Image (cartoon, helix red, strand yellow):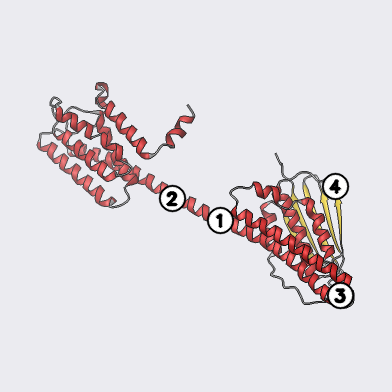
């Protein structure tokens, strides 16, 4: 029974409208339900005939196309309702169709809404005059009370229309915000990948230029390191392009750099000529991929800055596994004179890391060391992987 509403909502509007029209038409010929129909004028009723049957069907059957042509549906049903009342035929449950058509027009009529509302009001006023001329004992206040009911029904439909429009706008704005967030995330990933690897390549190439004449073997090692770094960069860029084309997150989870790859970052920095030590304290627990990726990017950005601004100076990476959080500290001693051209810095990496850690309720701090150099510290809380 719980799945029935979902099944019903999944049906096309034309199917649901047809089912509603058929049901209301069938119920219109149930004698016990006739007392529920609308009553205007309180005039003596004439016996039902063939025309009464036609008018009864005309007040319910047009509901089959109420969603596609709400104004036409209201016009047909409204005219049949007015003629049925003016000819003083017996009450019928099919007159409920007039209420449904009025609500649908208020909710779904896209254009000429004011003109349609004015036409309905004018038609009702004409019907009230005709009923009065036929000797209806109803007073003006009675006709006004029924008109107010019609106004409430129309207003309810108009309110539903506004709610749907606002909901569609919220969904549109939500989709735009989600797209902007995704573009920002991919931009951060591209920045981390490109900056780290290109910085390493530039430093290795500069060093190889100075070693070509004095130490050919070391220059050859530097060129081999450049080749390896370039391949790493291509691999990660291909992966990011795959993420852009992917329809799910499975590939992202399987191939994103994890905390265990910090040792590879340290080794790559050493190949680039940066003396780096790695120390880990505690036992590493399993963590969601976003936490591990954030830790990886913190170390990557810190080593990139060390290679840029303190080439050849000792750097230490320390990872502490606490009971409820992860502490990462990357310290570099005072800057050394650069042996080659300076590597330009865009200044976006640390800001991107701060935003990334903020989303994880973490914190990133950077500071100059008293004896020269700088340090990068990250606090990342653990989360329940269940």
Q: Reading the chain from its start, which is encountered first: label 2 or label 1? A: 2
Q: Which residue is labeled 4 in the image?
A: 282
Label 2–label 3 contact, CB within 8 A: no
- Label 4 and label 3: CA atoms lie apart by 41 Å
In the displayed structure image, the side of residue 287 where residue 20 appears, left or right: left
At horizontal 29% and vertical 30% (from top left) the residue drawn is: 24
Q: CA distance from mark 2 to mark 1?
A: 20 Å
Question: Which residue in the protein does label 2 denote?
Answer: 166
The quarter of the displayed image where residue 266 is located: bottom right
Q: CA distance from mark 3 to mark 1?
A: 47 Å
> Which structural element holds mark 1?
helix
Q: What's the distance in space between the residues labelled 4 and 1, CA to CA?
A: 39 Å
Quadrant housing the C terminus: top right
For label 4, the crowd category at 10 Å Cα-Cα, with few meaning under 14, some 14 to 19 and many 20 or more, is: few
Identity of the residue drawn at 70% across and 52% down: 256
**Cα distance in 3D space between marks 2 and 3:** 67 Å
Between discs 4 and 3, the one toward the N terminus:
3
Residue where numbered disc 1 is placed: 179
* Residue linked to disc 3: 211
């Amino acid at each position: 029974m719980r799945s029935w509403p979902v099944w019903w909502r999944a049906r096309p509007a034309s199917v649901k409208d047809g089912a509603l029209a058929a049901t209301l038409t069938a119920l219109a010929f149930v004698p016990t339900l006739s007392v529920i129909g609308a009553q205007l004028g309180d005039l003596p009723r004439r016996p039902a005939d063939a025309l009464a049957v036609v008018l009864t069907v005309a007040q319910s059957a047009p509901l089959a196309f109420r969603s596609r042509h709400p104004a036409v549906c209201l016009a047909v049903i409204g005219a049949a309702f007015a003629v049925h009342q003016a000819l003083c035929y017996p009450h019928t449950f099919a007159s409920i169709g007039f209420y449904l058509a009025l609500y649908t027009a208020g909710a779904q009529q896209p254009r000429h809404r004011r003109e349609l509302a004015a036409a309905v009001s004018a038609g009702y006023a004409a019907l009230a005059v005709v009923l009065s001329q036929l000797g209806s004992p109803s007073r003006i206040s009675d006709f006004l009370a029924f008109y107010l009911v019609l106004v409430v029904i129309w207003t309810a439909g108009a309110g539903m229309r506004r709610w749907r429009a606002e909901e569609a706008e919220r969904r549109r704005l939500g989709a735009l915000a989600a797209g902007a967030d995704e573009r920002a995330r991919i931009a951060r990933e591209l920045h981390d990948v490109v900056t780290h690897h290109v910085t390493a390549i530039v430093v290795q190439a500069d060093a190889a230029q100075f070693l070509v004449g004095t130490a050919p073997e070391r220059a050859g090692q530097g060129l081999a390191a450049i080749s390896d770094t370039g391949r790493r960069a291509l691999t990660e860029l291909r992966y990011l392009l795959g993420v852009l084309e992917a329809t799910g997150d499975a590939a992202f989870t399987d191939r994103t750099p994890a905390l265990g790859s910090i040792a590879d970052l340290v080794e790559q920095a050493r190949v680039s000529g940066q003396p780096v030590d790695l120390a880990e304290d505690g036992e590493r627990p399993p963590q969601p991929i976003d936490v591990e990726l954030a830790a990886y990017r913190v170390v990557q950005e810190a080593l990139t800055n060390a290679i840029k601004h303190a080439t050849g100076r000792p750097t230490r990476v320390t990872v502490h596994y606490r009971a409820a959080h992860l502490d990462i500290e990357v310290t570099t001693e005072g800057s050394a004179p650069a042996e080659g051209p300076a590597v330009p810095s865009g200044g976006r990496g640390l800001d991107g890391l701060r935003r990334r850690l903020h989303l994880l309720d973490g914190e990133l701090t950077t500071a100059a060391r008293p004896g020269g150099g700088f340090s990068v510290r990250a606090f990342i809380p653990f989360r329940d992987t269940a």
